[in-house]
């Protein structure tokens, strides 16, 4: 029985820790997924709460996982786990049947699974949750109730802090397809022989005021008494989708320049903004400085945005902006960098760097120094992340040792 208790809580606990962590380090990504759900369920009035809900959600999952693995407040944890799994099993069943979104976002951008796979996964973990719930009173407390609640609070505060750091900078780990080092054209390629989408097409023809549906195999091709009205196509089997698909860059005059954009041999400073109206005056000044540097040092400058043309014109007039804008799909922009605005350094289609607007470095207009600044900047960022995670783990282990109940 003891081995069963341990296996149950460790197995489901590790999955919850992973799920909460990968969503917690990318709170903007989780907020975007919440907004998708709000739109599907006609709850768009909750959009303003999407970020807060995403942080609460990831923290709750992380806490349940930690509590299961360590053995904290097991009765409360067992109830929380059971309620959590019942709710999401029902929700994912509906999503699998109705298919309102293509990805549930259960593991953020780290792991993508289909809606039916998500439901089957939840069925398994619901069974495990029921097992934990039935055995909830047999678990031996880790420490006194007071000390366990302090540990729970410390873990919660740590996860919220990690989420807020990632929100105000960039995700600690970048699981998105546009991560640093990516050659965008390569990730846009479809492998030879890869399966393509399969569709079922219905043709609508009218005769004597009656509209009838036909398939491609039996439509009245030679009967001129039938008049074609419309056609409908429904995807029945999804084919291979490259990691990056639907990426395009459109000039203000409507000209597509995607190939040129990805083939630039000079450095390209690329500003990313899904919504121009949310850029602060201070950040507009930073953007103009980057544009001036690009002009002075013969680098390229692009501004990929997802706002309507009239907003572009408003911003140009308000801030007297000297550059032109390009248009890209809003979802793509949010995937490239979790910042509005964000900065991407590109060369021959390779992403050399990405920055949140809080972390844009001071570039020098001399070519060799640009590489030095980038190298120093990334080493600094990586060092901070390693130290943060190391310090966090050290504090956690120290607390666990201090609070361990003496036998």
Image: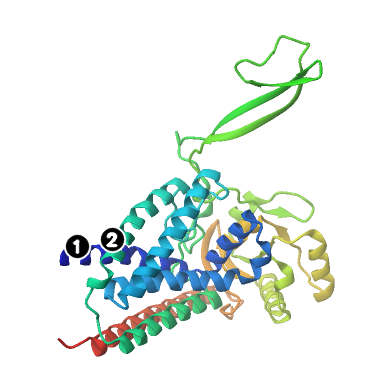
Q: How many marks?
A: 2
Q: Nearer the viewer, residue 401 or 98?
A: 98
Q: Nearer the viewer, residue 260 or 303?
A: 303
Where is residue 94 shown, x and y percent of the image?
A: 52, 49
Q: Residue at x 32, y 55 (%)?
A: 127
User: Which quadrant of the view contains residue 133?
Assistant: bottom left
Determine if residue 298 is in view: no
Q: Residue at x 32, y 74 (%)?
A: 75
Identify whether 328 is placed above or below 227: below
Q: Please tell me whether mark 2 sits on a helix, a strand or a loop.
A: helix
| C-beta proximity under 8 Å, tags 2 and 1 | yes
Q: Which mark is residue 357?
A: none
Determine if residue 184 is in view: yes
Where is residue 355 shown, x and y percent of the image?
A: 55, 72
Residue picked out by circle 1? 4
User: Which quadrant of the view contains residue 111?
Assistant: bottom left
Residue ranking furthest to the right: 317
State how far apart marks 2 and 1 are (Cα): 9 Å
Q: Quadrant of the N terminus?
A: bottom left
Where is residue 228 shown, x and y percent of the image?
A: 76, 21
Labels 2 and 1: the sequence-earlier one: 1
Where is residue 374 shown, x and y percent of the image?
A: 50, 74
Whether residue 385 sits left or right of residue 252 in the image: it is left
Identify whether 19 is placed above or below 320: above
Residue picked out by circle 2? 131
């Amino acid at each position: 029985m003891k081995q069963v208790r341990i296996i149950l809580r460790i197995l489901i606990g590790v999955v919850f820790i992973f799920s909460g962590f990968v969503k917690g380090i990318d709170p903007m990504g989780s907020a975007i997924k919440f907004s998708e759900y709000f739109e599907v369920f006609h709850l768009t009035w909750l959009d303003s709460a999407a970020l807060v809900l995403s942080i609460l959600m990831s923290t709750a999952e992380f806490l349940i996982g930690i509590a299961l693995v360590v053995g904290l407040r097991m009765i409360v944890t067992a109830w929380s786990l059971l309620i959590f799994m019942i709710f999401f099993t029902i929700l994912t069943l509906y999503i699998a049947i109705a298919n309102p979104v293509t990805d549930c976002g259960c593991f953020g951008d780290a792991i993508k699974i289909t809606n039916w796979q998500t439901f089957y996964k939840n069925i398994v973990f619901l069974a495990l949750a029921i097992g934990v719930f039935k055995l909830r009173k047999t678990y031996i407390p880790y420490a006194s109730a007071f000390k366990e609640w302090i540990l729970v609070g410390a873990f919660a505060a740590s996860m919220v802090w990690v989420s807020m750091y990632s929100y105000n900078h960039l995700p600690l780990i970048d699981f998105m397809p546009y991560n640093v080092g990516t050659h965008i054209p390569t990730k846009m390629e479809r492998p030879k022989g890869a399966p393509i989408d399969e569709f079922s097409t219905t043709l609508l023809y009218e005769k004597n005021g009656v509209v009838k549906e036909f398939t491609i195999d039996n439509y009245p091709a030679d009967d001129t008494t039938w008049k074609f009205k419309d056609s409908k196509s429904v995807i029945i089997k999804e084919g291979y989708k490259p990691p990056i698909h639907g990426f395009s860059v459109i000039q203000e005059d409507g000209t597509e320049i995607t190939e040129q954009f990805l083939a630039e041999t000079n450095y390209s400073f690329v500003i990313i903004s899904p919504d121009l109206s949310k850029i602060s005056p201070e950040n507009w000044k930073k953007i103009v400085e980057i544009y001036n540097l690009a002009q002075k040092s013969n680098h390229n400058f692009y501004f990929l945005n997802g706002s309507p043309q009239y907003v572009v014109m408003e911003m140009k007039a308000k801030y007297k902006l000297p550059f032109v804008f390009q248009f890209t799909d809003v979802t793509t922009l949010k995937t490239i960098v979790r910042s509005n605005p964000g900065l991407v350094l590109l060369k021959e289609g390779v992403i050399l760097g990405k920055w949140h607007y809080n972390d844009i470095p001071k570039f020098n207009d001399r070519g060799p120094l640009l590489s030095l600044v980038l190298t120093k900047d990334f080493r600094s960022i990586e060092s901070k992340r390693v130290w943060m995670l190391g310090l966090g783990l050290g504090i956690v282990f120290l607390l666990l040792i201090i609070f361990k109940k003496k036998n």
